[in-house]
Amino acid sequence: MTKYLTEAIGTFFLVLTVGCTVIPGAPGVIAPLAIGAILMVMIFAGGHVSGAHYNPAVTLGAWMRGATPTADVVPYWVAQIAGGLAASMIAIFLVGLPKSPALVPSVAPAFVAEFLFTFALVYVILNVATAKATAGNSYFGLAIGMTVMSGAFAVGGISGGAFNPAVAIGIAVMGLVVPSSIWIHIVSELLAGAAAALVFRILHPSRQA
């Protein structure tokens, strides 16, 4: 149960930070930096408990890589989505709904953007947080947080920059993207998580990698 609570808490603060920085759109607030930073510190806080996935696509990739037990996959997903939904409600309470219309992403560019940066995210996580050669390193949280920050800067205006099905659901609830586009995020992100795991296995053929 501690693992699932950790996943819910980490995802909660990730989505809450997205909402509280993006919805107001205040001058001087650099949302991608805040989002990458909160992800980094939550990973450092919870990595030793649950692996600090905070993302269904990461859980899928870690499971395919052999770093997450099958029994944990669905409970992780439930905890992550529940944490994200709770954070969405709190963010709306704190800062209200967006004053600008929700983003209506173009299907093909948004799909490619979400796929590529989710792939990058899961690829980085598998290499810095599950590989034997990098075991015990002190930089894994920074590497992961910076990957999300970079993706948000690069393609946030194209797709919303979720790279995470739980975040995608959260930004739809908060009115940042239209709910009808969420399938783009969920499908592309889960495919990207699976692709990253396959690439990791190709690059690290040994089961002990």
Image (spheres, grey):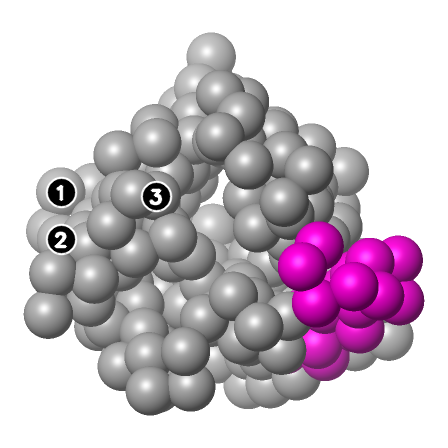
Q: Is residue 111 left or right of residue 72?
A: right
Q: Main secondary structure of the magenta part?
A: helix
Q: Mark 1 highlights which residue?
A: 94
Splitting the image into 4 quarters, where does residue 94 fall?
A: top left
User: Which residue corresponds to the image point at 52% horizontal and 66% vertical from the top-left?
Assistant: 67
Q: Is residue 75 left or right of residue 176?
A: left
User: Which residue corresponds to the image point at 55% horizontal and 44% vertical from the top-left?
Assistant: 129
The reply to whether the magenta stretch includes residue 91 is no
Q: Work out whether residue 38 can be spotted.
A: no
Say which of 71 and 53 sits in front. Answer: 71
User: Which residue corresponds to the image point at 47% horizontal and 12% vertical from the top-left?
Assistant: 28
Mark earlier in primary sequence (3, 2):
3
Q: Position of residue 65 (x, y in %)?
A: 64, 70
The reply to whether the magenta stretch includes residue 208 is yes
Disc 3 crowd, CA 10 A, few/some/many (<14, 14-19, 20+): some
- Above or below, comparing residue 3 to residue 41 in the picture: below
Q: Mark 3 highlights which residue?
A: 47
- Give, as a three-letter code, the residue at label 3: Gly
Kindly check if marks 1 and 2 are in contact, taking CB atoms under 8 A apart as contact.
yes
Q: CA distance from mark 1 to mark 2?
A: 6 Å
- Give the quadrant of the C terminus: bottom right
Q: Which region is colored magenta? A: 190-209
Q: Position of residue 97 (x, y in %)?
A: 28, 54
Q: Nearer the viewer, mark 1 or mark 2?
A: 2
Disc on res. 90: 2
User: Which residue corresponds to the image point at 63% horizontal and 45% vertical from the top-left?
Assistant: 132
Q: Nearer the viewer, mark 3 or mark 2?
A: 3
- Give, as a three-letter code, the residue at label 1: Leu
